[in-house]
Image (cartoon, rainbow, N blue to C red):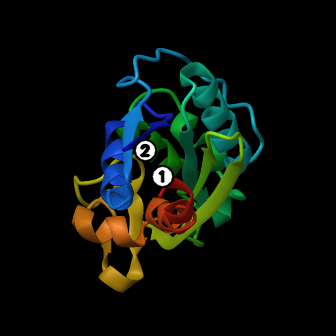
Amino acid sequence: MKRMIFATGNENKMKEIREILGALPLEILSMKEAGIQADIVEDGKTFEENAIIKAKSAAEFTGLPALADDSGLCVDALDGAPGIYSARYCEGTDEDRNAFLLKNMQDKENRACRFVCAIACVLADGETLTVRGECEGTLLRENHGAGGFGYDPLFYVEKYGCTFGELPAEIKNTISHRANALNKLKAILKDKVN
């Protein structure tokens, strides 16, 4: 089984990734599991640029093929913010960021938003692939549900009549932005890792 590094320290992301890519003959390790302690500077201007920066850094640190994602919430009424700054939208916890987002949306009627995920993959031969997944939703005015992470309790999915924070993981992992991107990547990697 081939080993691949996923450039994240986020255990929730690792769980999603392993569930979605589980059918591939890959052992996917986090940077921590690979013994890498590094702060990678994400100074790209797009989700794709940041994902490539992280994947290339992880490949250089380990000498192994690497994956990385950059994802976030883009809110139409805020001109796409928090976007690539979703995890750094304000200091503190997920709850702090959710509260800050709701404060910035107080006087906004347009609640359309989407989660975006770009995934970069650096293969053993240096080839770099990128895929993008999105999931459309509506930003609620208060948190609903304790599941998921990040902005999930505010992200309402019309089709299911609930937020990502209320959706069971097995459903979220079939419709989320990350699931959409990972499924595109899975289709490409199927031919490259067998």
The answer, for residue 167, to whether it is visible in the render is no
In the picture, measured across the screen, residue 46 lies left or right of residue 123, that is right
Q: Position of residue 21 (x, y in %)?
A: 39, 57
Q: Give the numbered dot on residue 77.
A: none
- Eyeballing the image, is 101 above or below 184? above
**Residue 125 placement: quadrant:** top right
Q: Give x and y (percent) for residue 38.
A: 53, 16
Depth check, front residue: 105 or 60: 60
Left or right: 161 as drawn, with respect to 76: left
Distance between the Cα atoms at labels 2 and 1? 5 Å
- Between 60 and 9, the one nearer to me in the picture: 60
Q: Nearer the viewer, residue 130 or 155?
A: 130
Query: Is residue 131 depicted above or below 82 in this figure?
Result: below
Kind of residue at disc 2: Ala
Residue appearing at x 54%, y 61% in the figure: 185
Q: Residue under circle 1?
A: 102
The residue type indicated by label 1 comes to Leu
Residue that numbered label 2 is attached to: 99
Tell me whether circle 2 and circle 1 mark residues in contact (CB < 8 Å): yes
How many numbered markers are drawn? 2
Please give left or right for residue 75 compared with residue 128 in the image. left
Q: Residue at x 52, y 38 (%)?
A: 87
**Residue visible at 36% across and 44% down?**
1
Q: Position of residue 76 (x, y in %)?
A: 66, 66
- Compared to residue 28, the image places residue 56 above or below, namely above
